[in-house]
Image (cartoon, rainbow, N blue to C red):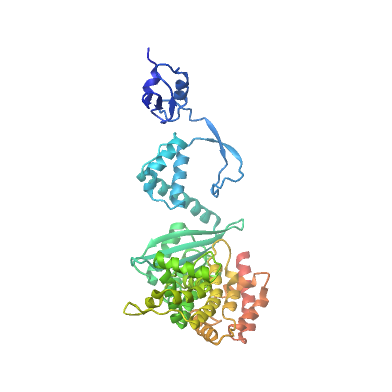
Amino acid sequence: MRSEVWSHLTKIQRGKKVKCNYCEKSYACDSNKTSTSGLWKHFKNCQANKSIKIDERQKVLARQLNDNDGGDGGIANITVLVFNKEACRRAMGKMIIVDELPFSFIEGVGFRKFMRYACPKFDIPSCRTVAMDILKLYSDEKEILKGKLISNKHRVCLTTDCWTSIQNISYMVIMAHFIDKNWVMYKKILNFSMVPNHKGETIRKLIETCLLDWGIEHVSTITIDNASANDGAIVYIKKVLKNWKVDGMVLGGSFMHVRCFAHIVNLIVNDGLKEFNVAIASIRNAVKYFRSSPSRLAKFKICIEREKIECKKLAILDVPTRWNATYLMLNSALKFEKAFDRMAEEDGFYCKYFVERENGKEREGPPTTEDWEKGRKFVKFLKTFYETTLKFSASSSVTSNLYFQHLLKIFSDRQDPILSDMAKNMKTKFDKYWGSVEKMNKILIVATVLDPRHKLEFVGCIGRLYDNILVESTKDEIKNLLYELYNQYKG
């Protein structure tokens, strides 16, 4: 009598091999001569066979994972896990979010085949189900954070940012920074949404809605761009918080409004770029030339070899509207000055490229010795701004106590006449947005004074930026402010 096991197998290679109908694993055998005991053993243990009842309570050994595990295969504790379908779906949702994958990824043939071997017990859900899981994951995480903010009554610092995309769509984001009872600093995005415009009324309504949604009643500061429309929004939020809670603000909200320093730096640097427009455009066009085709790139590499320039990375092309990208472009291109000069001698099309008209006028370039010299000076000048921006862009460390040190570094005296004049013009632009020392938010000075490396003596350095006469009166004012802050937090 023919064995039942053959109904679960398919003959291949003219009957010399058979393939399992479930896991597609093949075995060498002859249906007329081979014993079926080995085939029965595979059939009973085949995980792809849905007809086999598997004990869901069966445990397996696995590496102990946590939310911060990068999967690098390092030393980890071994733990016992039980298959949990809901946990797998939750992990899949986190994978989609963290790796920024499209929902259609889970419907890919390769992923489904991999999961069939890696975890046959897990039924891969549809795109719609994954989308619902991610929304539920967001809701769960939101409730956890909301409960933490409400129960512990954390005083948060809000940061807002508005911008317009290339599709001419306006967006606004609201972030919160706070320190928990264990002195751990958190940065959380509370709101990210489209807005009709960037007017003060729109901004204030969105901030108020965000505070209500998250149950936030204690706000320390709000860092916002330097548009005049934002001043009215801050006044409105102060009035709202005052009605909600008596102690909802620090010292009645007198120091709530913080003007974004990174935004000010961006404005004054873009203004300073105008002094070097021709030199920068010449170098940019030179980089654009060899980056525009493989043949030009090959010629440029030959020039690099002949000039014996040792550099692993070639000059990069910048985004003209982003000054930090322009800095990186200039910094990388300056290393290849001799290679560009050789290109002018050996590549006949190089100089002709700059004669061609672009947007109705001839291209700037090729870069001259004077252009390269200006580029070197400007890179040295921009380096301070670039490093300052990186410092203030940190999200896992406190930056408010670094403000004055970097400000003094930026506007220190320059020996070069061109850079000195540019620094003065930038200082004028800075004063326009930040104002005098009387109007400055004194909380930033307090943050510096609380740094044990500086203390109250650092207030004397303000005289290098502002009027020396105001230093002593400012020092007394900061001392009184420290007492007021202490008394409020003590109460």
> Considering the image in quadrants, where does the N terminus appear?
top left
**164 to the left or right of 453:** left
Residue 277 position within the rendered picture, expressed as x and y whole percent measured from the top left: 44, 80
In depth, the one of 228 and 42 nearer the eye is: 42
Q: Is residue 33 above or below residue 180?
A: above
Q: Residue furthest left?
A: 360
**15 to the left or right of 148:** left
- Asked if one can make out residue 449 in the rendered structure from this viewpoint, the answer is yes
Residue 35 position within the rendered picture, expressed as x and y whole percent measured from the top left: 45, 17
Based on the displayed image, in which of its 4 quarters is residue 186 positioned?
bottom right
In depth, the one of 222 and 111 nearer the eye is: 111
Residue for point 48% across, 68% down: 302
Counting labels gives 0
Q: Is residue 83 above or below residue 327?
A: above
In depth, the one of 445 and 60 nearer the eye is: 60
Q: Is residue 141 above or below residue 451?
A: above
Residue for point 45% across, 63% down: 174
- Asked if one can make out residue 491 in the rendered structure from this viewpoint, the answer is no
> Considering the image in quadrants, where does the C terminus appear?
bottom right
